[in-house]
Image (spheres, rainbow, N blue to C red):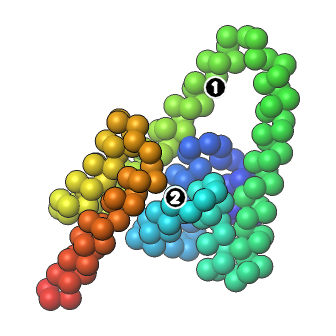
């Protein structure tokens, strides 16, 4: 039911933020750390990130049937809404107000994604290297417009090293 609600109420770039709110904050099905790890993997895999998240979470909670149901619940409402909106857009695209509404919706998606990023960034308080890696990736992809895949692959070795050093430090106090 949660994925059906997410699929019916979320749109575009804000989907990850709504998924975080529903799965981590409201339902408690995943921890912050587990969601962040899953989100990272979902972004690397081919396909839409929210659908990849739904597959993983459904699989984790209820096995293969859960993955199938979560995926269908996430995709079906969005598919219906896109068909409906494309029909409406075709009728209204000549009006400048239509484009203003779409720009406003894009701002909502950006704000939702930024909110989720800020919530997860709080977990990195005092951890300089992960913050620097995240900032470097943001600059390379978001500002310099470098392709995402090479940037992610280049970021893997330092991220693994930082994770290893962090877990080693936790073990040794």
Q: Indicate the position of residue 94 as horizontal and vertical percent values.
A: 76, 11
Vertical comparison of 65 with 45: above or below: below
Residue positioned most to the left: 173
32 or 92, which lies in front? 92
156 or 3, which lies in front? 156
Q: Indicate the position of residue 100 as horizontal and vertical percent values.
A: 61, 18
- Distance of mark 2 from mark 1, alpha carbons? 24 Å
Residue 17 appears left or right of 58: left
| Residue tagged 2 | 43
CA neighbours of label 2 inside 10 A, class few (<14), some (14 to 19), many (20+): some
Q: Residue at x 63, y 25 (%)?
A: 102
Q: Residue at x 79, y 41 (%)?
A: 81
Residue 112 appears left or right of 122: right
Q: Is residue 20 visible?
A: no
Query: In this rendering, which labeled residue sits more in front, label 2 or label 1?
Result: 2
Q: Indicate the position of residue 85 as horizontal and vertical percent values.
A: 79, 33
Vertical comparison of 132 with 91: above or below: below
Q: Which mark is residue 102?
A: 1
Could you tell me which quadrant the C terminus lies in?
A: bottom left
Could you tell me which quadrant the N terminus lies in?
A: bottom right
Q: Indicate the position of residue 26 as horizontal and vertical percent values.
A: 55, 64
Q: Residue at x 20, y 61 (%)?
A: 129
Q: Is residue 130 visible?
A: yes
Res 3 → quadrant? bottom right
Vertical comparison of 63 with 18: above or below: below
Vertical comparison of 36 with 91: above or below: below
Q: Which mark is residue 138?
A: none
Give the number of marks.
Answer: 2
Q: Residue at x 60, y 31 (%)?
A: 105
CA neighbours of label 1 inside 10 A, class few (<14), some (14 to 19), many (20+): few
Answer with mark 2 or mark 1, whichever residue precedes in sequence.
2
- Label 1 sits on a secondary structure element that is helix
């Amino acid at each position: 039911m949660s994925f059906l609600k997410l699929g019916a109420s979320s749109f575009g770039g804000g989907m990850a933020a709504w998924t975080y709110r529903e799965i981590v904050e409201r339902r408690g099905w995943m921890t912050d750390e587990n969601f962040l790890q899953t989100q990272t993997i979902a972004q690397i895999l081919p396909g839409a990130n929210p659908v990849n998240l739904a597959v993983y979470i459904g699989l984790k909670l209820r096995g293969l049937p859960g993955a199938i149901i979560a995926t269908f619940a996430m995709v079906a409402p969005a598919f219906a809404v896109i068909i409906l909106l494309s029909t409406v857009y075709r009728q209204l695209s000549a009006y400048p107000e239509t484009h203003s509404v779409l720009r406003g919706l894009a701002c909502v998606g950006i704000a939702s994604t930024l909110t989720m990023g800020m919530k997860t960034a709080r977990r990195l308080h005092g951890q300089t290297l992960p913050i620097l890696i995240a900032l470097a990736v943001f600059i390379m992809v978001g500002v310099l417009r470098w392709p995402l895949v090479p940037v992610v692959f280049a970021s893997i070795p330092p991220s693994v090293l930082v994770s290893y050093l962090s877990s080693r430090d936790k073990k040794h106090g």
